[in-house]
Amino acid sequence: MPNFTRIIAGFAIGLIALGLTTSSASAQPDAQYAPTMLILDASGSMQRPDPAGTMMDAAKNAVRSFVGSAPDAAQVGLATYGTSTGNTEAEKAAGCQDVSILRRAETIDRTALNTAVDGIQPRGWTPMGTALRQVAQSLPDSGARSIVLVSDGDDTCSPPEPCDVARELKQQGLDLVVHTIGFAVDDKARTQLDCVAKTTGGTYSDAVDGPALERILPKVSTAALRKYEATGSPITGTANYHEAPVAAPGQYLDSIGQRETRYYAVDVPLDATAYFTGIVSFPRLANISSVDDFNRFDLRVYGKDGQDCRAAEHEQASRSSDGVTLTISKTWDGATKVSKSQGGTSKYCTGAGRYYFALTWDKISDGVPERLPLELLVGIESATTDPGPVAVLPTTEFVEPTGDPTPVTGGGSFNVATTLDDSGRYTDTLRPGEYVFYRVRLNWGQGLAYRVHFEANGERGTDVTSNITTTLYSPLAHEIDMDSFVYTGRDGVLPSHDPSMATVPIRYNNRQADKAEVRKQALAGWYYIAVKLGSTASEGGNTPVPIRLHLTVSGDQEAGPTYAEGTANGVLGDDKSPTSKSPGESEVTMAEREGEPSNNVLMIAAIGGVGVAVLAAIALVLLRRRRG
């Protein structure tokens, strides 16, 4: 891709995964979406006038808009409070228990949901804290879950205080995120709703009137459906190297605090190569200034006795509040080298031994939580006795596929990435703010090439303008290539300036190539294609966009390298559950750690939606994450 195109391509969200249990194009699961409950305030104050008629009328319109555009496989429910009593003092005791679960979060039934919302009549009190508790109990017992709460005021029934309930849910280890929308609220209610959202890792949005709510609610609800679950075997990094936990190849889950450094140890055999990756996903946040919206992570390698090996990586995420994922990786080949001196760092940072990887959350953007889930990938690749063919082959040629298109549903994260079985035409539908993932298996000697077509959706103008992006990732958390452009409702294609996004045929010796992007294509395995339709400008709608992904998989399969020690369990331990030196620990998700079950292999993801107008999109893409 030309350098100029790389600049204009703009912001990128680092995200990767290996060997996860995923759906295939021929057998799509329905569990692509987090069960999501909408809680609609039906207190007496919702009878106030609004351009839509009353505030309740505007809220109903907003719910209908979301229900009409939600994916067929979405699991959506509806609850309300304040419909069974009036709002007099005499009715307060009963009114503060007045919470109704109208529809549970099951596969969406549009007719039933619209009928339920049509029947809501606002009358009573605002038992927000009680509603949060009851609605949380109505959701499934495990896995990612979301609540979207719309309220026009603060809780009039506390205790329990809504923020206390949010803390209670968080302390119970529930993987539950609450997004809140303040509908023409005052400062007191805004503070209360913002606290609920931040405590659970959700977002707070202001809707100043009915038209604003009708724009905001569908977008927030759509984002809630695509919640990503962080998973891995539990591990706890330490503040110093000599107490660091020892990690074998696999996937791990920790958390990291602001300006904190976490150390992890990896035993690297002689002549082996170690891989270490850290991944952090940032929550979506509203009203964050672009000048205060950067996060940076540093990754350093230390050798025997904690000596600094002077090997470091630095990654920075711009526009973190768009929900980006920052990925930082290090390939460590110190064990393949022999010390040439008795002094300096050489004798500490060469040969077999225990090495330490230290991650630091160095630069902090406004509004982010004090701690965030941290996923780790650890890999060990033994030496080879025969690395296989030496030559780097030309880039895979894209050949326009023929035949009928195959409908697919891209996964909301890498752990549910949809498998594209072979060359072909695949169709999907994205909604503004969605970032979806597909995976393609490349064996030694094989390569891929693809193009993504964004079709016209019948809308025009800056109100529907959004950033579109596609990114190609290797099995080692490395971005191989990315392209980005502006979608305005008309047909568009990515990449915009090249014939296709493509790999070279996968060979072990690609790691010796002159080009950095080719060196990332040195392992057979799952290669990931991410496609994003960014959020529209604040005035825009939620109209879906059909996409077509045209894929070529070609190349003669080769034997690949011969490893001295064998790789029965895979370089990254992906053929077995990852284990650390703490026996008896099983793989968990972030909720179980704070207290989540997971697959037994690697997984990382990110969802990055960006709201843009034309000029904003151009400005944003120039803020692409810089690699250190």
Image: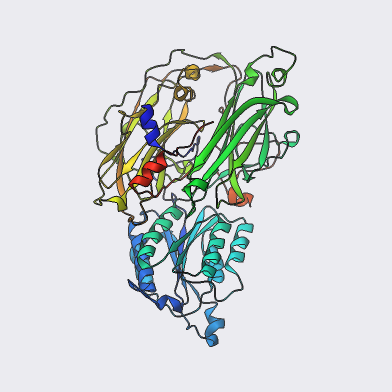
Q: Outermost residue toward the front?
A: 291
Q: In the rendered image of this protein, does residue 126 appear above or below residue 39?
A: below
Residue name at image x 38 percent, y 36 percent? 9
Residue name at image x 25 percent, y 46 percent? 456
Residue name at image x 43 percent, y 49 percent? 32
Q: Position of residue 121 (x, y in %)?
A: 40, 77
- The number of numbered discs placed on residues in the rendered structure image is 0
In this rendering, position of residue 242 left or right of residue 100:
right
Q: Position of residue 317 (x, y in %)?
A: 51, 40
Q: In the rendered image of this protein, does residue 606 appear above or below residue 159?
A: above
Residue 289 visible in the snapshot: yes
Between residue 551 and residue 370, name the one nearer to us: 370
Q: Position of residue 143 (x, y in %)?
A: 53, 52
**Quadrant where the N terminus is found in the figure:** top left
Between residue 261 and residue 505, name the one nearer to us: 261
Between residue 570 and residue 44, name the one nearer to us: 44
Q: Position of residue 192 (x, y in %)?
A: 55, 66
Residue name at image x 26 percent, y 44 percent? 455
Rendered image coloring scheme: rainbow
